């Protein structure tokens, strides 16, 4: 089955009791047993839910994985995955992870004896220098936020697989429409379903996709034991969102490319970060591992001040000033004062998050209108 058919059909079958083509919202906390221990595979809502099952199977199919496991948020998925580790274990991670992931690792898990190494992986060979006998996991985000750095998934997989280290890719920014890390050697894919998969800015959810049976059993145990499960209604919304994933992503990518090229030619713009440019430092890797270049673009201004950035962001009318990404509507954000405000200035500048850096989550509106909006917003600088 090809991707555009899987989004609509994979893991989903008409409801056996009514024929309803849409997976019903099984809004129930428990299931009646005909005798003690005799049931139809469903006992309690935290443990199993048919709406969640359909979504988990659908997501697994989209990532070419055997198993999907869903959680109440992307961070709940990450939390549950890290709980499979033990004190003393070490994790090698990218240096520009999603801020919430970084916070969970450092503030949530370091105190339990886990050691995280945050390193720049844009040259994948450096990963080997940080791997030792205690290394149990490698954690990568590509493209990264907000600089859209690209990490070579196959190259990191080679290092991880040789040592039997679990290799995790947070595939939120790309979505399975653009890349399938498991096909390139990753062991586990993590998603914030909140973003492109849900796609309509109306649900918070996370997911893990994987092939390994033993790790899947552990995750299913923790999903039930910890209980960070998504609500049935949210599973329904995610299933509905995913049905148009391929169509939405086509337009997200098309609009993002047009906007990246428009910005690159604009006299007020100093630099545009978009992996589709041949001048992007890891363009060749992006070309190899991605089927398209995604809907995210970031750029800095010739006048590199917080004020200039804020001025442009306050002037857009279609791009709404907000955190998050991946919804049908276009969003604009200022990493220096929003997502990256807690990072010390020197460190922030070193990673490229300069004062005027603006991040766009390009939506699926008409591209002409989006470009006109950015044009009039940038005009406030002249
Ligand atoms: C949003 C996001 C998360 C966290 O997901 P939530 O659903 O907000 O908990 C993790 N990773 C990336 C790359 C994200 O963008």
Image (cartoon, rainbow, N blue to C red):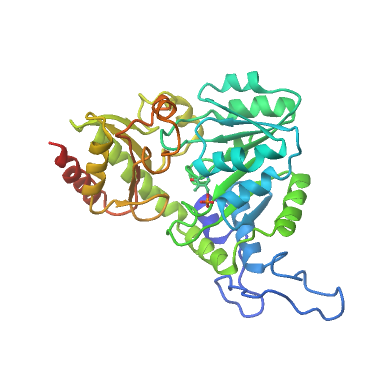
Query: If the image is split into quadrants, where does the C terminus sit?
Result: top left
- Residue at 55%, 55% (x, y): give it: 6
Q: Is residue 23 above or below residue 18?
A: above
What is the quadrant of residue 302 in the picture?
top left
Decide: is 70 above or below 278. below
Q: Name the residue located 14 percent from the left edge and 41 percent from the top edge.
A: 379
Q: How many marks?
A: 0
In depth, the one of 330 and 132 nearer the eye is 132
**Can you give x and y, in whole percent of width and height, for residue 353 in the image?**
38, 31
Q: In the rendered image, is residue 180 in sight?
A: no
Answer whether residue 212 is visible to the viewer in this image.
yes
Which x, y percent locates residue 373?
Answer: 21, 48
Question: Toward the viewer: 245 or 229?
Answer: 229
**Residue 45, image x, y percentages:** 69, 69
What percent of the width, then of the height, locates residue 211? 70, 44
- Residue at (45%, 34%) from the top-left corner? 343
Q: Residue at x 62, y 46 (%)?
A: 78
**Closer to us: 330 or 181:** 330
Q: Nearer the viewer, residue 76 or 154?
A: 76
* Residue 273 in the figure: left or right of residue 57: left
Q: Find the residue positioned furthest to the left.
A: 382
């Amino acid at each position: 089955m090809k991707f555009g058919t899987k989004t609509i059909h994979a893991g989903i079958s008409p409801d056996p009791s009514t024929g309803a083509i849409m997976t019903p919202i099984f809004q129930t906390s428990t299931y009646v047993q005909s005798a003690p221990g005799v049931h139809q595979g469903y006992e309690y809502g935290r443990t199993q839910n048919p709406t969640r099952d359909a979504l988990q199977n659908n997501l697994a199919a989209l990532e070419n994985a055997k198993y999907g496991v869903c959680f109440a948020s992307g961070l709940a998925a990450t939390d549950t995955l890290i709980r499979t580790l033990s004190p003393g274990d070490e994790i090698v991670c990218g240096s520009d992870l999603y801020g919430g992931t970084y916070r969970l690792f450092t503030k949530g898990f370091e105190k339990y004896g886990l050691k995280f190494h945050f390193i720049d992986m844009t040259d994948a060979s450096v990963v080997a220098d940080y791997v030792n006998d205690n290394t149990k996991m490698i954690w990568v985000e590509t493209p990264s936020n907000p600089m859209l750095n690209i990490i070579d998934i196959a190259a990191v997989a080679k290092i991880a697989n040789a040592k039997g280290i679990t290799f995790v890719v947070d595939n939120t920014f790309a979505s399975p429409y653009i890349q399938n890390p498991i096909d390139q050697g990753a062991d586990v894919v993590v998603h914030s379903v909140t973003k492109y998969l849900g796609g309509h800015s109306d649900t918070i959810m996370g997911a893990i996709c994987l092939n390994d049976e033993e790790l899947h059993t552990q995750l299913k145990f923790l999903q039930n034991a910890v209980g960070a499960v998504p609500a049935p209604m949210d599973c329904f919304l995610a299933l509905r969102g995913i049905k148009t994933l391929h169509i939405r992503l086509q337009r997200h990518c098309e609009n993002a490319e047009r906007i990246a090229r428009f910005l690159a030619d604009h006299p007020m713009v100093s630099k545009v970060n978009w992996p589709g440019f041949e001048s992007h430092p890891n363009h060749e890797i992006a070309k190899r591992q991605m089927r398209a270049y995604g809907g995210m673009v970031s750029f800095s201004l010739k006048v590199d001040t917080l004020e200039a950035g804020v001025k442009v962001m306050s002037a857009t009318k279609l791009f709404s000033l907000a955190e998050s990404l991946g919804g049908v509507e276009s969003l604009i954000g200022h990493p220096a004062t929003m997502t990256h405000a807690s990072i010390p200035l020197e460190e922030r500048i070193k990673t490229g998050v300069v004062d005027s850096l603006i991040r766009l989550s390009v939506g699926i509106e008409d591209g002409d209108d989006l470009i006109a909006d950015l044009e009039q917003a940038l005009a406030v600088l002249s």
